[in-house]
Every structure is written in structure tokens, then in C-alpha cells.
Image (cartoon, coloured by chain):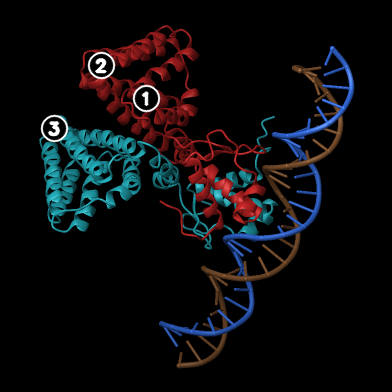
Chain colours: A cyan, B red, C blue, D brown
Amino acid sequence: MTEKAAGRAADQVVEAMTQRIRNGTLADGQPLPAERDMMTEFGISRTVAREAVVILSSHGLVDAKPRFRPVVRKPGFDSAMDAAGSVVGNLLAQPDGVKNLFESRIMIEAALVRGAATSAGKQDIIDLQNALAANGAAVEDSDRFYQTDVAFHEVFYKVSGNPVWPALHRAYATWLAPQWEQMPRLPDRNRENFAAHQAIFDAILLRDPDGAEAALRRHLAAAWEQVHLTFGNI
Amino acid sequence: MTEKAAGRAADQVVEAMTQRIRNGTLADGQPLPAERDMMTEFGISRTVAREAVVILSSHGLVDAKPRFRPVVRKPGFDSAMDAAGSVVGNLLAQPDGVKNLFESRIMIEAALVRGAATSAGKQDIIDLQNALAANGAAVEDSDRFYQTDVAFHEVFYKVSGNPVWPALHRAYATWLAPQWEQMPRLPDRNRENFAAHQAIFDAILLRDPDGAEAALRRHLAAAWEQVHLTFGNI
DNA sequence: ATCCCTGTTTTGTATGATGAAAAATGCAAA
DNA sequence: TTTGCATTTTTCATCATACAAAACAGGGAT
């Protein structure tokens, strides 16, 4: 009665493969067995084998480029965010989708800078300082400024040590990049943003969570304002 | 990220269907066209049509139960979290997976109670009070206490008005339920948790973000302690 | 050793077939 | 007319087979 086998045949294959990936029988970076091999091993048709691969891919357990052998990817928060990405794309197409996602980012990042202000270690401070310096050195080069901007924010996501946050940062960066990339980039705006970064950093140095949070919120609210001005009502 | 270029024929079908779902040509709850219809319309084979459905399903755009006609599901943060759920399952199987996820919840919920403490409206306060009362009335009935416990926490996720958070709450509840359900439930522990809830609520009434956050962190840290005691090292 | 050519492997797609389950239909009884 | 049931029709899930095209692997020419 506990039989769930009644469902898709592919699910059994998916389960088996999932276990092998988890316990390392199929190592990270290794190609998945060929479809024919899976056929003979599980006694299934290619239809099912292919379906299993598609599902595994959607679960983020394998990286499947067309025409290439699917490659095993050890499950991590990164692959999770990747897999979720295809879904998030739908959200962004919805009314207020971008706004809601961006606001969620603001709240999370606010919490992270709070955490940084209260518990950043020596190395974290150094990382922040370096990222800030690199950012400041790039105000005249908008492309490089963008990169160092992202890198600066990324430091906050690393402070807690919880791998969820760096993965989420990459996810946010990826998801919101389309909006960001279309915005006009001017040294003036870069200078403004750099000043905001500096204000956040200063507040963290002072171990002032409220100040750091306020500075970050101002910074991101201004960024959103720019998005809004550029795109009109999203 | 956006899917690979026109490598797979199924991707084109997926894209077309995605647009139809987004713009409402295929309404929410409506069944997807039969495979045969998609074949003739797009000039593809069943193989491809089928693959397209699997991909759409993994994107959370359709709800595909075996043997049933796939049903269109309007993309929302809920379906996104749903789709992500299968991926998160992998994370939880990894070392520290549960811990990392739970810690991320603590941080987010801390930020949310802060927000509630600073900007909860009249209705929010009423909702919190009601949820708290229901929770208090259920200390002797552990099942009901669990439900009202979840409901109480859920209120915080609703205060900001951003639909990301309620969806995330449901996601957390679903993902962490397996751990939670196996824990021993005793009226004593219920009373303790209820007291913690009350402390959070009181701090919110006082518009004291720091106090509310501290109370919540104590509450969730204690909860994690319980998980730890029950399961040993997760 | 490097590069190119070639045969083999593997994937992407198409087509036809079959059993089973769901949906639609028609008919009889109340 | 409406309800309940049995039968027919669709549709799904899976299998088997086939073929083109792209990737891979090995050998030969430079």
C-alpha cells in the first residue's frame, strides 16, 4: 500500500540517480550514463530515460546542455537557486514581480548589514574595505564599477558563513541583471553609489546596526528609484 | 538563466506555451491542449510535445498529475517555491543542510518581526493578537498548538504586504515539516513556546524592534536546540 | 607534438503501436 | 427530466525502431 510506483516510471529512475549523486557513486562533474545504459539497467525505454534526465536537470542535479552528455552537479544552494531561476523568470513577468523581488532583496540585505555591523570579524572588515577600495577606484569605468559594486554587496552575503546567502546573492544578481544592465551608467551615479557604499561601511566600522541598515536602505531605495525612472511603471 | 538557444525543439514549444499562460490565452485552471493538438500546431512529434510538458511542469507553470491532463497554474511566488521544493530536498540531505536552512529562516524572520515592530498596522496587530490567543488556547492540544504556532509565525510574513514572504513561509513550513513533525510535543514545551510568542508580541506592541528581534531569536534558538536534542547532530 | 580526417557513439527527433486510465457519450430507469 | 450506469472514444504512458546530426575518439599526416 505504500507503493508510489504507480506514478511515472521516470520517477523511479530519478530517485535512483538522485541517490547515486548524493552518495557520490556518481561524482560531481562526471557525465551521466548514456541513455542506452540506463535503458538496459532499469529496463525502461528511451522515452522514460530521457524524461528522467529532464527531471533531474530541473532539480538542478545535472547540467544538461543540448547535444552534450548531461553532467552531474552536486546539489548545493547554488544549483538550487539556478533551478529556481527558470521559475523566477515567470514571476518577473508578472505585475510588480520585479518590485516585489527587489524589495525582498532590500529586506534581506538590510538584515545582513545589521549582522555585519554586529558581528563582522577582522577578515570580513578587510574584505569589505578591499571591495570598497576597488569600487572607489572604478568610478570612472562604469563596467568595472558595476562588477565591483556587485562584489561589494556580495561581501555582506558572506559574513554569516551560511552558504544560503552567497547563493541567494548570485541568484538576485542573475535575476535582476536584465533590469540593471539596461540602466544608464554615468560616473556621477557611480560616485553617488560609491558614497553610499562608504556610508554603509563606515556605519559597520562603528558597529552601528541601525546606521548601517538605514544607509543601505537609502542606497537601495535610490537604486530602485533609478530603475523606476528608467522603466516607468514595472 | 534563460534556457539555451534553439537547441531543443521542445524549448520553442515551452516558450510559446509560457507566453500564452502569461498573457492569459491559457487561463489559470484550464487544461493544457492535448499532446496531439500541440503536435499538429507546432509540427512536432509526441516525443517533443511530451518533453515540453515535463519542462513546463518543472517550471511550475502547469500542474501535471500522472494520467491526468496537465492543468495550467498561473505563475506566482507559491508555484515558484513549490518548484524549488524538489531542489531543496537535495539540500536538506546534505551536511548542515537543515541547519543552514533553519538559520536562514531565523534571520529572515528576525528581519520580519523588526518590520512588524516598526510598521505593523492596526489590522496586523489584531491579526497577531488573534493568532496569539488561538495559540494560547491550544497549549493542551499539541496538534492544534502546532497549527496555531505556524499560523502565528505566518502573520509576520504577511505584514510587509510583499507576496514573497507568505510564499516563503509556506515553503519553510513545508521543507522543515519533516523535522518538526518527529519532535516530541508536550504541553510543557507548548507553554514555553506560547510564552515566547507572547514576549514577541509584547515587544511589537511596544514598538521595540530590538526587543522583538531578541525575543524571536531566543524563541527560534530554543526551537533549534530542541531539534538538535531530538536528532543529535544533523 | 599538433592538427585534420574519419568511423563510432550518443543525442535529438520522428513514427508507429499497445495497454491502461480518464473523459465523453448514450441509454435505461426512476 | 434527471440520475445512474455501462460503453465507447480520447488521451496518456510507455515501448520499439529508425535516422540525421552533432560530439567523441582514434589514427594518420604534417
Please tell me how many numbered marks the rendered image carries.
3
Task: Name the amino acid type tagged 2.
Answer: Ile
Q: Amino acid at mark 1?
A: Glu
Compute the Cα span from label 2 to label 3. Answer: 21 Å
Mark 2 chain: B
- Residue depicted at x 35% and y 23%: B158
Q: Is residue B123 above or below residue B177?
A: above
Mark 1 or 2: the one toward you: 2
Q: Position of residue B70 (x, y in %)?
A: 60, 39
Q: Are marks 1 and 2 in contact (CB under 8 Å)?
A: no
Regarding mark 1 in the picture, which secondary structure is present there? helix
**Quarter in which the C terminus of chain A is drawn:** top left
Which residue position is annotated with label 3?
A211
Q: Within 10 angstroms of label 3, few (less than 14), some, or many (20 or more) residues?
A: many
Q: Nearer the viewer, residue B34 or B121?
A: B34
Q: Mark 1 packing: few (<14 Cα in 10 Å), some, or many (20+)?
A: few
Amino acid at pointer 3: Gly
Please give the residue where the numbered disc 2 appears in the rendered image: B204
